[in-house]
Image (spheres, rainbow, N blue to C red):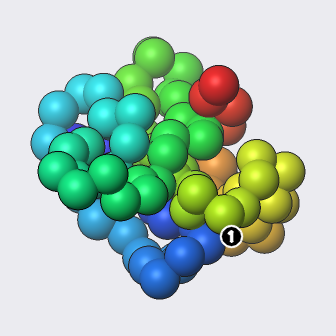
Amino acid sequence: MVRALFVGGVVDNTEMDLDGPQPPKHYPENTGGGAPRYSLRQLGVRDGGEVAYAVYGAPEVDDGFVRRVADERDYARRFDASPKTVH
């Protein structure tokens, strides 16, 4: 299970659990209406390669903002994982 963490938009600072070992590239995966979706910006990876957390950014925020907020919220320490930027 991977913990999803959200930065920006209406669900800022919300968390939820995702099933599976790899998080989807966008959340929600299929909106059906072409609405903006949160995109995967950062993964927290543990020493064994396990993904501990996934940081999703709102469409209106840039990668630098997401990184700064993730650092301020100290996700890497909290989940004992190393942050990896997703492109």
Residue occupying image coordinates x 35% and y 59%: 35
Three-letter amino acid code at disc 1?
A: Arg
| Image label count | 1
Residue 75: give x, y in percent of width and height. Answer: 61, 58
Furthest residue in direction bottom, as rendered: 10
In this rendering, the answer to whether 32 lies above or below 46 is below
- Quadrant position of residue 51: top left
Residue occupying image coordinates x 76% and y 47%: 63
Secondary structure category for the residue under label 1:
loop
| Residue nearest the observer in this picture, 49 or 86 | 86
| Residue nearest the observer in this picture, 77 or 40 | 40
In this rendering, the answer to whether 25 lies above or below 53 is above
Q: Quadrant of the C terminus?
A: top right
Residue 49 appears in the rendering: yes
Q: Quadrant of the N terminus?
A: top left
Furthest residue in direction top, as rendered: 48
Drawn side of residue 82 relative to residue 12, left or right:
right
Residue 3 appears in the rendering: no
Say which residue label 1 marks: 73
Furthest residue in direction front, as rendered: 33
- Quadrant position of residue 2: top left
| Residue nearest the observer in this picture, 18 or 64 | 64
In this rendering, the answer to whether 42 lies above or below 61 is above
Residue occupying image coordinates x 53% and y 51%: 55
In this rendering, the answer to whether 40 lies above or below 57 is above
Drawn side of residue 66 relative to residue 23, left or right:
right
Residue 50: give x, y in percent of width and height. Answer: 39, 25
Residue 18: give x, y in percent of width and height. Answer: 22, 49
